[in-house]
Image: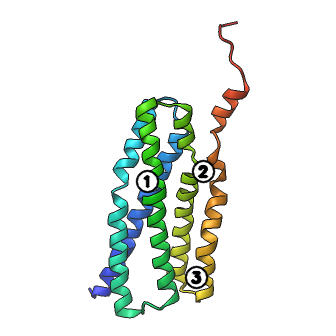
Amino acid sequence: MPAYSLMLFLHFAFMIAAVAASALAGFAAWRLRCVQSSAEAVQWAQFVRRVVPTFPVASLGLLGTGAYMTSKLWTWSTPWVIAGLAGLIAIMLLGAGVEGQRGRAAVAELRASGLSPRARGLLRDPVAWSAKVTTWTLVLAVVFVMTAKPTALICALALVSAPIAGVLLAVPFWSAPRREQSEKLVPRPSRPI
């Protein structure tokens, strides 16, 4: 098997690992928005903590295999190579920087005060959710530019439109889940009727 084919396979394997970890972390974050107890919240937060180590390994694998393939068959000035690299760096910064920092703040609040109003607010933090969904839209943009290999203009449009779409798609996650909203609207009697 030629080395390039092996690197291409590994590149896809690292991408699949990153997407799977992102899906699992996203599902856990979605579940965290709906928790009813601090114990349940800590359980989902621990799940995310176990998934997170996949990201640096997958990112380094993508960078290494991508660098090998670029040096063998492409150039570093190829527009879709630049766009793919820029997209991966943005994904890493959003994940480790924004999501990671805000996730640690939410876990610290859960441990200190339980499922307090501040903790609930941190679990649906607009900045954290915008970063999370933007990583998903950036992944789609990077996969698009890496497979379609478009011109520099199309690569730029894909990378610019991904964060805009990510923030817009994240808006529904900023508010309380429907169940929580309906509980606030319908007062419960303090004693049985």
Nearest to N terminus: mark 1 or mark 3? 1
- Residue position for label 2: 126
- Asked which secondary structure carries label 1, the reply is helix
Which residue is painted at 43% across and 90% down in the image?
Answer: 76
Q: Residues within 10 Å of mark 1 (few under 14, many from 20)?
A: some
Which residue is painted at 60% across and 81% down in the image?
Answer: 156
Which residue is painted at 68% across and 17% down in the image?
Answer: 188
- Residue position for label 1: 100
- Residue position for label 3: 155
Q: Residues within 10 Å of mark 3 (few under 14, many from 20)?
A: many
Left/right placement of residue 106 relative to residue 163 reads: left
The answer to whether residue 152 of the structure is visible from this angle is yes
Disc 1 + disc 3, Cβ < 8 Å:
no
Placement of 49 over or under 63, stated as above or below: above
Quarter holding residue 74: bottom left
Front position in the image: 132 or 121: 121
Quarter holding residue 64: bottom left
